[in-house]
Image (tube, rainbow, N blue to C red):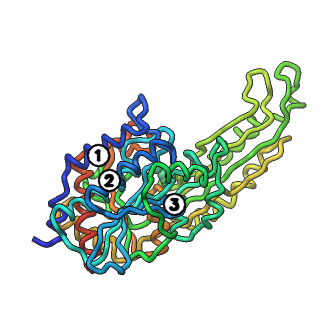
Amino acid sequence: MTDAAKAAAAVDEDRLWRRHMEMARLGATPAGGVRRLALDANDNEARRRLVDWARGFGFACALDPIGNLFIRREGSLREAPPVMTGSHTDTQPSGGKFDGIYGVLAACEALEALERAQIATRRPIEAVVWTCEEGGARFPMGTMGSSAFAGVRPLADILKVTDDAGISVEEALRGTRAALKGVPERPLGCQVAAFIEAHIEQGPELEARGLTIGVVTAIQGARRFLVEIAGEDAHAGTTTRARRKDALSAAVRMVSALERVFHDDPTDTVRFTVGRFRISPDAPAVVPGHALFTIDFRHPDEAVLTKLGDQVEALCRAQAGPCAVTVTETSRSRPVPFTSHVPDVIESAAARLDYARMRILSGAGHDAMHLAKLCPTGMIFVPCEKGISHNETENATAADLAAGTRVLAASLVELANA
Ligand code: GLV
Ligand code: MN
Ligand code: MN
Protein backbone atom coordinates (compact mmCIF):
# COMPACT_ATOMS: atom_id res chain seq x y z
CA MET A 1 0.00 0.00 0.00
CA THR A 2 1.29 3.51 -0.79
CA ASP A 3 1.59 6.10 1.97
CA ALA A 4 -1.25 8.06 0.34
CA ALA A 5 -3.51 4.98 0.50
CA LYS A 6 -2.46 4.31 4.11
CA ALA A 7 -3.30 7.90 5.07
CA ALA A 8 -6.73 7.60 3.45
CA ALA A 9 -7.36 4.28 5.20
CA ALA A 10 -6.55 5.82 8.59
CA VAL A 11 -9.32 8.46 8.28
CA ASP A 12 -12.01 7.63 10.85
CA GLU A 13 -15.58 8.45 9.76
CA ASP A 14 -17.12 8.21 13.25
CA ARG A 15 -14.46 10.36 14.89
CA LEU A 16 -14.85 13.01 12.17
CA TRP A 17 -18.65 13.05 12.54
CA ARG A 18 -18.46 13.23 16.34
CA ARG A 19 -16.19 16.25 16.09
CA HIS A 20 -18.65 17.99 13.77
CA MET A 21 -21.44 17.43 16.28
CA GLU A 22 -19.25 18.67 19.15
CA MET A 23 -18.32 21.84 17.27
CA ALA A 24 -22.00 22.37 16.33
CA ARG A 25 -22.76 22.86 20.03
CA LEU A 26 -20.62 26.01 20.04
CA GLY A 27 -23.20 28.60 18.99
CA ALA A 28 -26.02 26.05 18.50
CA THR A 29 -29.37 27.67 17.59
CA PRO A 30 -32.80 26.31 18.62
CA ALA A 31 -33.55 25.43 14.97
CA GLY A 32 -30.53 23.12 14.75
CA GLY A 33 -28.15 25.56 13.11
CA VAL A 34 -25.04 27.40 14.30
CA ARG A 35 -24.43 31.06 15.00
CA ARG A 36 -20.69 31.33 15.62
CA LEU A 37 -19.66 34.78 14.53
CA ALA A 38 -16.03 35.57 13.76
CA LEU A 39 -13.90 36.03 16.89
CA ASP A 40 -16.86 35.71 19.27
CA ALA A 41 -16.67 33.53 22.40
CA ASN A 42 -17.82 30.40 20.54
CA ASP A 43 -15.38 30.94 17.68
CA ASN A 44 -12.57 31.39 20.21
CA GLU A 45 -13.66 28.24 22.06
CA ALA A 46 -13.65 26.26 18.78
CA ARG A 47 -10.05 27.30 18.22
CA ARG A 48 -9.13 26.53 21.83
CA ARG A 49 -10.42 22.98 21.41
CA LEU A 50 -8.40 22.55 18.22
CA VAL A 51 -5.28 23.70 20.07
CA ASP A 52 -6.00 21.21 22.88
CA TRP A 53 -6.37 18.45 20.30
CA ALA A 54 -3.14 19.49 18.53
CA ARG A 55 -1.16 19.52 21.78
CA GLY A 56 -2.28 15.94 22.41
CA PHE A 57 -0.32 14.92 19.31
CA GLY A 58 2.59 17.28 19.89
CA PHE A 59 1.70 19.40 16.83
CA ALA A 60 3.03 22.95 17.11
CA CYS A 61 0.42 25.75 17.07
CA ALA A 62 0.87 29.40 16.16
CA LEU A 63 -1.27 32.52 15.67
CA ASP A 64 -0.46 35.22 13.15
CA PRO A 65 -1.33 38.94 13.56
CA ILE A 66 -4.82 38.54 12.02
CA GLY A 67 -5.59 35.53 14.24
CA ASN A 68 -5.14 32.79 11.65
CA LEU A 69 -4.35 29.60 13.60
CA PHE A 70 -1.76 27.16 12.22
CA ILE A 71 -1.33 23.57 13.44
CA ARG A 72 1.84 22.01 12.10
CA ARG A 73 2.89 18.41 11.58
CA GLU A 74 6.61 18.50 10.95
CA GLY A 75 8.23 17.10 7.80
CA SER A 76 11.74 15.76 7.33
CA LEU A 77 12.60 18.98 5.44
CA ARG A 78 11.87 21.34 8.33
CA GLU A 79 12.82 24.47 6.37
CA ALA A 80 10.74 23.60 3.30
CA PRO A 81 7.55 25.61 2.66
CA PRO A 82 4.62 23.66 4.10
CA VAL A 83 1.63 22.21 2.32
CA MET A 84 -1.42 23.86 3.89
CA THR A 85 -5.04 22.80 4.24
CA GLY A 86 -7.96 24.34 6.10
CA SER A 87 -10.99 26.62 6.04
CA HIS A 88 -12.91 28.66 8.63
CA THR A 89 -14.71 28.16 11.96
CA ASP A 90 -17.02 31.21 11.76
CA THR A 91 -20.57 30.96 10.40
CA GLN A 92 -23.32 33.15 9.02
CA PRO A 93 -25.74 34.51 11.71
CA SER A 94 -28.08 31.60 11.00
CA GLY A 95 -25.56 29.19 9.56
CA GLY A 96 -25.24 25.42 9.52
CA LYS A 97 -23.06 22.70 11.00
CA PHE A 98 -20.71 22.19 8.04
CA ASP A 99 -19.85 25.37 6.11
CA GLY A 100 -16.25 26.11 7.00
CA ILE A 101 -15.82 23.82 9.98
CA TYR A 102 -15.75 20.79 7.66
CA GLY A 103 -12.57 22.02 5.96
CA VAL A 104 -10.97 22.60 9.37
CA LEU A 105 -11.98 19.24 10.86
CA ALA A 106 -11.04 17.42 7.64
CA ALA A 107 -7.59 19.05 7.82
CA CYS A 108 -7.17 17.97 11.45
CA GLU A 109 -8.46 14.47 10.72
CA ALA A 110 -5.94 14.18 7.87
CA LEU A 111 -3.10 15.17 10.25
CA GLU A 112 -4.34 12.68 12.83
CA ALA A 113 -4.59 9.94 10.18
CA LEU A 114 -0.98 10.56 9.09
CA GLU A 115 0.16 10.52 12.69
CA ARG A 116 -1.70 7.32 13.61
CA ALA A 117 -0.50 5.57 10.44
CA GLN A 118 3.06 6.81 11.20
CA ILE A 119 3.50 8.31 7.74
CA ALA A 120 6.50 10.61 7.38
CA THR A 121 6.36 13.39 4.79
CA ARG A 122 9.18 15.48 3.35
CA ARG A 123 7.38 18.81 3.66
CA PRO A 124 5.58 19.92 6.83
CA ILE A 125 1.79 19.94 6.60
CA GLU A 126 -0.19 22.70 8.33
CA ALA A 127 -3.89 22.71 9.17
CA VAL A 128 -5.15 26.31 9.13
CA VAL A 129 -8.14 28.16 10.56
CA TRP A 130 -8.55 31.33 8.49
CA THR A 131 -10.07 34.22 10.47
CA CYS A 132 -13.51 35.62 9.55
CA GLU A 133 -14.38 34.09 6.20
CA GLU A 134 -18.07 35.04 6.36
CA GLY A 135 -18.41 38.61 5.07
CA GLY A 136 -21.30 40.64 6.47
CA ALA A 137 -22.01 38.17 9.29
CA ARG A 138 -20.24 40.04 12.11
CA PHE A 139 -17.76 42.27 10.29
CA PRO A 140 -18.59 43.70 6.87
CA MET A 141 -15.44 42.18 5.35
CA GLY A 142 -15.10 38.47 4.53
CA THR A 143 -12.09 36.19 3.85
CA MET A 144 -10.25 38.52 6.24
CA GLY A 145 -7.54 36.17 7.47
CA SER A 146 -6.67 34.64 4.12
CA SER A 147 -6.61 37.99 2.32
CA ALA A 148 -4.26 39.44 4.96
CA PHE A 149 -2.07 36.31 4.72
CA ALA A 150 -1.91 36.59 0.93
CA GLY A 151 -1.21 40.34 1.06
CA VAL A 152 -4.40 41.14 -0.85
CA ARG A 153 -5.48 43.73 1.74
CA PRO A 154 -3.26 45.63 4.19
CA LEU A 155 -3.35 44.25 7.74
CA ALA A 156 -3.63 47.75 9.24
CA ASP A 157 -6.86 48.41 7.28
CA ILE A 158 -8.40 45.09 8.29
CA LEU A 159 -7.62 45.58 11.99
CA LYS A 160 -9.62 48.84 11.92
CA VAL A 161 -12.80 47.24 10.54
CA THR A 162 -15.63 47.36 13.13
CA ASP A 163 -18.76 45.31 13.78
CA ASP A 164 -22.22 46.83 14.36
CA ALA A 165 -21.38 47.38 18.06
CA GLY A 166 -18.29 49.39 17.12
CA ILE A 167 -15.82 46.67 18.21
CA SER A 168 -12.79 46.59 15.93
CA VAL A 169 -11.10 43.45 14.64
CA GLU A 170 -8.04 44.53 16.62
CA GLU A 171 -10.04 44.61 19.87
CA ALA A 172 -11.81 41.33 19.12
CA LEU A 173 -8.46 39.65 18.49
CA ARG A 174 -7.43 40.45 22.08
CA GLY A 175 -10.17 38.08 23.25
CA THR A 176 -8.99 35.41 20.82
CA ARG A 177 -5.41 35.68 22.04
CA ALA A 178 -6.59 35.52 25.66
CA ALA A 179 -8.56 32.34 24.88
CA LEU A 180 -5.47 30.81 23.25
CA LYS A 181 -3.00 31.71 25.98
CA GLY A 182 0.39 30.12 25.42
CA VAL A 183 -0.02 29.80 21.63
CA PRO A 184 3.01 31.57 20.14
CA GLU A 185 2.79 34.35 17.54
CA ARG A 186 4.19 34.02 14.06
CA PRO A 187 4.60 36.68 11.37
CA LEU A 188 1.95 37.27 8.74
CA GLY A 189 2.38 35.25 5.53
CA CYS A 190 4.97 32.72 4.45
CA GLN A 191 5.90 30.67 1.44
CA VAL A 192 3.40 27.88 0.84
CA ALA A 193 4.10 24.80 -1.29
CA ALA A 194 0.42 24.10 -2.03
CA PHE A 195 -3.04 24.62 -0.49
CA ILE A 196 -6.18 22.47 -0.46
CA GLU A 197 -9.53 23.47 1.08
CA ALA A 198 -12.21 20.84 1.67
CA HIS A 199 -15.77 22.19 1.77
CA ILE A 200 -19.38 21.13 1.37
CA GLU A 201 -20.53 22.02 -2.14
CA GLN A 202 -23.26 24.45 -0.96
CA GLY A 203 -25.06 23.71 -4.23
CA PRO A 204 -27.08 20.79 -5.64
CA GLU A 205 -24.90 19.33 -8.43
CA LEU A 206 -23.06 16.47 -6.70
CA GLU A 207 -26.13 15.14 -4.89
CA ALA A 208 -28.32 15.40 -8.02
CA ARG A 209 -25.80 13.34 -10.02
CA GLY A 210 -25.13 10.83 -7.25
CA LEU A 211 -21.46 11.80 -7.05
CA THR A 212 -19.22 11.88 -3.97
CA ILE A 213 -16.37 14.24 -4.87
CA GLY A 214 -16.23 17.58 -6.67
CA VAL A 215 -12.83 18.63 -7.98
CA VAL A 216 -13.11 22.41 -8.05
CA THR A 217 -11.82 24.08 -11.21
CA ALA A 218 -12.52 27.74 -10.37
CA ILE A 219 -14.33 30.14 -8.03
CA GLN A 220 -16.69 32.60 -9.71
CA GLY A 221 -16.19 36.34 -9.32
CA ALA A 222 -18.29 38.64 -7.16
CA ARG A 223 -19.13 42.35 -6.91
CA ARG A 224 -20.85 43.77 -3.84
CA PHE A 225 -22.56 47.14 -3.54
CA LEU A 226 -24.15 49.24 -0.83
CA VAL A 227 -27.02 51.48 -1.99
CA GLU A 228 -28.05 54.27 0.39
CA ILE A 229 -31.13 56.39 -0.22
CA ALA A 230 -31.83 59.67 1.52
CA GLY A 231 -35.35 61.12 1.44
CA GLU A 232 -37.17 62.91 4.24
CA ASP A 233 -38.98 61.63 7.35
CA ALA A 234 -42.57 62.85 7.23
CA HIS A 235 -45.95 62.43 8.90
CA ALA A 236 -47.88 59.48 7.43
CA GLY A 237 -51.24 61.20 7.94
CA THR A 238 -50.56 64.67 6.65
CA THR A 239 -47.99 64.35 3.88
CA THR A 240 -49.43 64.21 0.35
CA ARG A 241 -47.93 61.91 -2.24
CA ALA A 242 -46.58 64.92 -4.13
CA ARG A 243 -44.66 66.17 -1.08
CA ARG A 244 -43.18 62.83 -0.02
CA LYS A 245 -39.52 61.90 -0.33
CA ASP A 246 -40.11 58.26 0.52
CA ALA A 247 -36.79 56.41 0.62
CA LEU A 248 -38.46 53.00 0.86
CA SER A 249 -40.54 53.55 -2.29
CA ALA A 250 -37.41 54.60 -4.16
CA ALA A 251 -35.50 51.54 -2.89
CA VAL A 252 -38.29 49.19 -3.95
CA ARG A 253 -38.32 50.70 -7.46
CA MET A 254 -34.52 50.30 -7.64
CA VAL A 255 -34.59 46.64 -6.63
CA SER A 256 -37.33 45.92 -9.21
CA ALA A 257 -35.37 47.69 -11.95
CA LEU A 258 -32.19 45.79 -11.02
CA GLU A 259 -34.02 42.45 -11.00
CA ARG A 260 -35.32 43.11 -14.52
CA VAL A 261 -31.71 43.44 -15.75
CA PHE A 262 -29.80 40.96 -13.54
CA HIS A 263 -30.98 37.66 -14.94
CA ASP A 264 -30.05 35.47 -17.89
CA ASP A 265 -32.87 33.01 -18.50
CA PRO A 266 -32.68 30.22 -19.49
CA THR A 267 -29.02 29.64 -18.52
CA ASP A 268 -29.65 31.12 -15.04
CA THR A 269 -25.97 31.77 -14.37
CA VAL A 270 -26.30 35.30 -12.98
CA ARG A 271 -26.51 35.38 -9.18
CA PHE A 272 -28.15 38.57 -7.90
CA THR A 273 -29.07 38.96 -4.22
CA VAL A 274 -30.40 41.79 -2.09
CA GLY A 275 -29.57 40.23 1.28
CA ARG A 276 -29.92 43.29 3.50
CA PHE A 277 -32.68 45.87 3.33
CA ARG A 278 -33.09 48.44 6.07
CA ILE A 279 -35.27 51.48 6.52
CA SER A 280 -35.37 54.17 9.11
CA PRO A 281 -36.91 55.36 11.27
CA ASP A 282 -38.81 52.05 10.83
CA ALA A 283 -42.00 53.35 12.45
CA PRO A 284 -45.53 52.67 11.15
CA ALA A 285 -46.65 56.32 11.18
CA VAL A 286 -43.54 57.82 9.56
CA VAL A 287 -42.72 58.05 5.83
CA PRO A 288 -39.23 56.48 5.83
CA GLY A 289 -36.56 59.07 5.20
CA HIS A 290 -33.68 56.61 4.84
CA ALA A 291 -33.21 53.22 3.24
CA LEU A 292 -30.25 51.07 2.40
CA PHE A 293 -29.78 47.76 0.69
CA THR A 294 -26.90 45.55 -0.36
CA ILE A 295 -26.28 43.83 -3.68
CA ASP A 296 -24.30 40.60 -3.97
CA PHE A 297 -23.73 39.88 -7.68
CA ARG A 298 -21.70 36.87 -8.87
CA HIS A 299 -20.79 35.36 -12.22
CA PRO A 300 -17.97 33.14 -13.56
CA ASP A 301 -17.23 35.51 -16.47
CA GLU A 302 -15.31 38.72 -15.75
CA ALA A 303 -16.81 40.41 -18.84
CA VAL A 304 -20.36 39.86 -17.52
CA LEU A 305 -19.34 41.07 -14.05
CA THR A 306 -18.12 44.28 -15.67
CA LYS A 307 -21.01 44.74 -18.10
CA LEU A 308 -23.85 44.21 -15.61
CA GLY A 309 -22.11 45.49 -12.46
CA ASP A 310 -21.25 48.78 -14.15
CA GLN A 311 -24.98 49.42 -14.68
CA VAL A 312 -25.90 49.34 -10.97
CA GLU A 313 -25.41 53.02 -10.28
CA ALA A 314 -27.30 54.26 -13.35
CA LEU A 315 -30.21 51.87 -12.73
CA CYS A 316 -30.52 53.12 -9.15
CA ARG A 317 -30.25 56.80 -10.10
CA ALA A 318 -32.98 56.41 -12.69
CA GLN A 319 -35.41 55.24 -9.97
CA ALA A 320 -34.42 57.71 -7.20
CA GLY A 321 -37.31 60.16 -7.84
CA PRO A 322 -37.11 62.99 -5.27
CA CYS A 323 -34.51 61.13 -3.14
CA ALA A 324 -30.72 61.24 -3.22
CA VAL A 325 -28.90 57.96 -3.81
CA THR A 326 -25.31 56.92 -3.13
CA VAL A 327 -23.96 53.68 -4.62
CA THR A 328 -20.71 52.30 -3.18
CA GLU A 329 -18.95 49.23 -4.50
CA THR A 330 -17.79 47.56 -1.27
CA SER A 331 -15.81 44.68 -2.79
CA ARG A 332 -14.89 43.10 -6.09
CA SER A 333 -13.21 39.77 -6.69
CA ARG A 334 -12.35 38.40 -10.09
CA PRO A 335 -13.11 34.80 -11.03
CA VAL A 336 -10.23 32.60 -9.81
CA PRO A 337 -9.33 29.58 -11.96
CA PHE A 338 -7.32 26.80 -10.27
CA THR A 339 -4.73 26.35 -13.00
CA SER A 340 -2.04 24.36 -11.17
CA HIS A 341 -1.50 20.59 -10.90
CA VAL A 342 -3.42 20.45 -7.57
CA PRO A 343 -6.86 19.68 -9.11
CA ASP A 344 -5.20 16.79 -11.02
CA VAL A 345 -3.65 15.49 -7.78
CA ILE A 346 -7.10 15.61 -6.13
CA GLU A 347 -8.79 13.94 -9.09
CA SER A 348 -6.21 11.12 -9.20
CA ALA A 349 -6.57 10.55 -5.45
CA ALA A 350 -10.37 10.35 -5.82
CA ALA A 351 -9.98 7.94 -8.75
CA ARG A 352 -7.61 5.66 -6.80
CA LEU A 353 -10.11 5.62 -3.93
CA ASP A 354 -12.81 4.82 -6.48
CA TYR A 355 -15.10 7.74 -5.66
CA ALA A 356 -17.56 8.95 -8.31
CA ARG A 357 -16.50 12.50 -9.12
CA MET A 358 -16.78 15.50 -11.43
CA ARG A 359 -15.00 18.77 -12.09
CA ILE A 360 -17.08 21.62 -10.73
CA LEU A 361 -17.19 25.44 -10.49
CA SER A 362 -17.58 26.99 -7.05
CA GLY A 363 -20.47 29.43 -6.83
CA ALA A 364 -19.47 30.42 -3.29
CA GLY A 365 -16.38 32.38 -2.35
CA HIS A 366 -13.68 30.67 -0.27
CA ASP A 367 -10.35 31.42 1.39
CA ALA A 368 -8.78 29.30 -1.38
CA MET A 369 -9.31 32.18 -3.83
CA HIS A 370 -6.65 34.23 -2.05
CA LEU A 371 -4.28 31.29 -1.53
CA ALA A 372 -4.43 30.67 -5.30
CA LYS A 373 -2.50 33.94 -5.72
CA LEU A 374 0.33 32.53 -3.58
CA CYS A 375 0.67 28.87 -4.43
CA PRO A 376 -0.76 25.90 -6.36
CA THR A 377 -4.28 25.55 -4.96
CA GLY A 378 -7.29 23.29 -5.19
CA MET A 379 -10.56 22.48 -3.44
CA ILE A 380 -12.44 19.27 -2.67
CA PHE A 381 -16.25 19.46 -2.56
CA VAL A 382 -18.55 16.89 -0.99
CA PRO A 383 -22.34 16.86 -1.44
CA CYS A 384 -24.70 18.60 0.96
CA GLU A 385 -28.39 17.78 1.28
CA LYS A 386 -30.49 19.43 -1.46
CA GLY A 387 -27.61 21.88 -1.95
CA ILE A 388 -28.85 23.91 1.02
CA SER A 389 -26.28 26.10 2.79
CA HIS A 390 -26.15 29.42 4.69
CA ASN A 391 -29.19 27.88 6.36
CA GLU A 392 -29.70 26.24 9.75
CA THR A 393 -30.86 23.00 8.11
CA GLU A 394 -27.59 22.57 6.15
CA ASN A 395 -26.75 18.85 6.21
CA ALA A 396 -24.21 16.34 4.89
CA THR A 397 -23.62 12.63 5.46
CA ALA A 398 -20.85 11.22 7.63
CA ALA A 399 -19.84 8.95 4.73
CA ASP A 400 -19.41 11.84 2.27
CA LEU A 401 -17.51 13.97 4.79
CA ALA A 402 -15.15 11.05 5.40
CA ALA A 403 -14.76 10.40 1.65
CA GLY A 404 -13.67 14.00 1.06
CA THR A 405 -11.26 13.71 3.98
CA ARG A 406 -9.72 10.52 2.56
CA VAL A 407 -9.17 12.29 -0.75
CA LEU A 408 -7.66 15.20 1.18
CA ALA A 409 -5.32 12.99 3.23
CA ALA A 410 -4.08 11.14 0.15
CA SER A 411 -3.61 14.38 -1.82
CA LEU A 412 -1.66 15.98 1.06
CA VAL A 413 0.74 13.03 1.17
CA GLU A 414 1.32 13.33 -2.62
CA LEU A 415 1.93 17.09 -2.39
CA ALA A 416 4.08 16.92 0.73
CA ASN A 417 6.36 14.32 -0.84
CA ALA A 418 6.57 15.94 -4.29
C1 GLV B 1 -19.10 32.69 1.41
O1 GLV B 1 -19.67 32.15 2.33
C2 GLV B 1 -19.82 33.26 0.31
O2 GLV B 1 -20.78 34.03 0.57
O3 GLV B 1 -19.52 32.95 -0.85
MN1 MN C 1 -17.39 28.45 3.83
MN1 MN D 1 -20.32 30.55 4.10
- N-terminal label among 1 and 3: 1
* Residue 19 disc label: 1
Residue 253 sits in quarter: top right
Cα distance between the residues tagged 2 and 1: 7 Å
Determine crowd level at label 2: few under 14, some 14-19, many 20+ residues with C-alpha closer than 10 A.
many
Query: Quick one: SS at disc 2?
Result: helix
Residue tagged by mark 2?
105
Q: Residue at x 41, y 75 (%)?
A: 192
Q: How many numbered marks, from 0 up?
A: 3
Determine crowd level at label 3: few under 14, some 14-19, many 20+ residues with C-alpha closer than 10 A.
many
Query: Quick one: SS at disc 1?
Result: helix
Residue tagged by mark 3?
145
Against 189, residue 181 (above or below) is above
Q: Residue at x 84, y 19 (%)?
A: 237
Cα distance between the residues tagged 2 and 3: 18 Å
Quarter in which the N terminus is drawn: bottom left
Residue 409 percent coordinates (x, y) = 25, 64
Query: Quick one: SS at disc 3?
Result: helix
Residue 131 percent coordinates (x, y) = 49, 56
**Most foreground residue, 248 or 155:** 155
Q: Residue at x 57, y 49 (%)?
A: 172
Q: At label 1, which amino acid type do we have?
A: Arg
Q: At label 2, which amino acid type do we have?
A: Leu
- N-terminal label among 2 and 1: 1
Query: Does residue 361 appear anywhere in the picture?
Result: no
**Most foreground residue, 386 or 23:** 23
Query: Does residue 131 appear anywhere in the picture?
Result: yes
* Residue 8 disc label: none
Q: Are marks 2 and 1 in contact (CB under 8 Å)?
A: yes
Asked if the beta carbon under badge 1 is closer than 8 A to the nearest atom of ligand 2, the reply is no
